[in-house]
Amino acid sequence: MDPWRPAAGGLTVALRVTPRGGRDAIDGVETLSDGRSVLKVRVRAIADGGEANRAVTELLAKAIGVTKKAVRITSGTTARLKQVAIDGDASKLDQALRDLLAAHKPTGT
């Protein structure tokens, strides 16, 4: 199951964020213990004063080719599990996320 779903004006994406992760990267999809799927994201920024949240929205925007303004955190601003809204054409955003994950498939799995 994909960690994103269509929403009014775009997509909603479930994330699990690792601040101070050593690099800025999208590490694929993970299934949580409750069965939900999340997009794993790591950023170099620390979770202080919203720095990690800014880094997450900038990373996602750049990775799928939308403006920074089109990506906003809708819930979980102080938690590792977050919901992010991405504004735009839902089918194009869906394809951009699929392409991104296909390009970043880890080897050996």
Image (cartoon, helix red, strand yellow):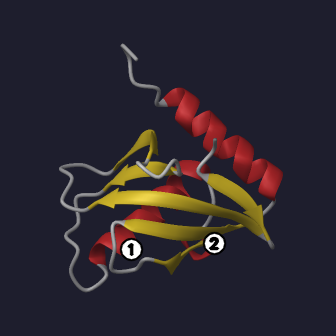
Q: Mark 2 points at which residue?
A: 70
Dot 1: element? helix
Q: Which residue is drawn at 22% across and 58% down?
A: 44
Q: From the viewer's perspective, is residue 2 above or below residue 65?
A: above
Amino acid type, label 1 = Arg
Query: Picture quarter containing residue 74?
Result: bottom right
Residue 6 in the figure: left or right of residue 62: right
Query: Where, quadrant-wise, is the C terminus in this rendering?
Result: top left
Dot 2, crowdedness within 10 Å: few (<14), some or many (≥20)?
Answer: some
Q: Nearer the viewer, residue 70 or 3?
A: 3
Q: Position of residue 69 (x, y in %)?
A: 59, 76
Q: Position of residue 100 (x, y in %)?
A: 56, 38
Dot 2: element? helix
Q: Which residue is drawn at 78% across and 49% down?
A: 92
Amino acid type, label 2 = Ala
Q: Earlier in the sequence, mark 1 or mark 2?
A: 1
Residue placed farthest to the top in the image? Answer: 108
Residue placed farthest to the front in the image? Answer: 34
